[in-house]
Amino acid sequence: MATRYRFGDDEKPHFITSSVINWVDVFSRETYKQILVESLQYCIDNKGLRLHAWVIMSNHVHLIASAREGYQLVNVIRDFKKFTSRNIIDAISSNIQESRKNWMIWMFKRAAERNGNNHTYQFWQQDNHPIELSTNQMMDQRLTYTHENPVTAGYVWEPQHYKYSSAIDYYTELTGLLPVELLV
C-alpha cells in the first residue's frame, strides 16, 4: 500500500507511530510492554537508534527518534517491529494466564491472511507514519503530544508519572527506563 509518509534525513528526529492491528490493547499487560522496552534498548545499543522521546500506550507506540551516522532509521524501525511482533506473539501464545490469548492470536492470524506481506501473523499495522521534525515548533508539538498521551487517556494526572514514557526525563531530574537524547 502506497503512503505519503516517508523517512527523511536519518540523522534528524522523526515522529513515528506504530499501532497494533485493529487497535488491539496488547500493551495493557506489563510483560508485553517490557518486550518493547528491551527491544528499544537493544536498538539503541546495537542498531544505531537515537531515542529522543517515547511512550507506550495500550495499542500503539509513539517515538521521536533518529539514527546515528551510518545507520538508516527505516531499517532500525523495520527490525524493531519484526522482532517485537514475533516475540510478543510468542509471549501471548505461551502465557497461560492470558485470558484474551485465543482472540488476539485469531486477530493477528486473520490480519495476516488479508495481507500478502505476512505469512502467519500480522501484529503491527503496515505503516509507521514517520514525520521528519524539521522545525522547533514541530518538535515541541510532537514532544508535548507524546508525553500528554497517558494524561489524555486517563492513566495519570501528570506526564512524568507514567512509567512507560520519556516524560520523566523531560520534566524532572530523574531518568526513565530508557536512555534518551533530549531535544533542546
Image: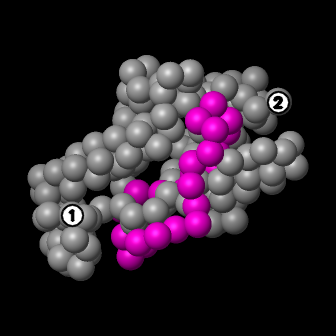
In the image, residue 117 above or below residue 115: above
Q: CA distance from mark 2 to mark 1?
A: 39 Å
Going from N to C along the chain, the mark reached first, 2 or 1, is: 1
Name the residue rendered at 39%, 66% in the picture: 125
Name the residue rendered at 38%, 33% in the picture: 38
Q: Which residue is mark 1?
A: 118
Measuring from the top left, give residue 19's x and y in whole percent.
46, 63
Name the residue rendered at 68%, 48% in the picture: 132
> Is residue 11 part of the magenta span, yes or no?
yes
Q: Categorize mark 1 by other alpha carbons within 10 Å: few (<14), some (14-19), many (20+).
A: few
Please tell me in which quadrant of the rendered image residue 102 appears.
Answer: bottom left
Name the residue rendered at 62%, 45% in the picture: 8
Q: Which residue is mark 2?
A: 184
Mark seen at residue 181:
none
> Is residue 98 part of the magenta span, yes or no?
no
Can see residue 43? Answer: yes
Residue mark closest to the camera, 2 vs 1 = 1
Q: Secondary structure at mark 1?
A: loop
Q: Categorize mark 2 by other alpha carbons within 10 Å: few (<14), some (14-19), many (20+).
A: few
147 and 119: which one is in front? 119
Quadrant where the C terminus sits is top right
Q: Is residue 80 left or right of residue 153?
A: left
Magenta stretch?
1-27
Q: Secondary structure at mark 2?
A: loop
Please tell me in which quadrant of the rendered image residue 170 appears.
Answer: top right
Quadrant where the N terminus sits is bottom left
Instruction: Say what amino acid the circle numbered 2 marks.
Output: Val
Instruction: Say what amino acid the circle numbered 1 marks.
Output: Asn
Q: Is residue 77 left or right of residue 112?
A: right
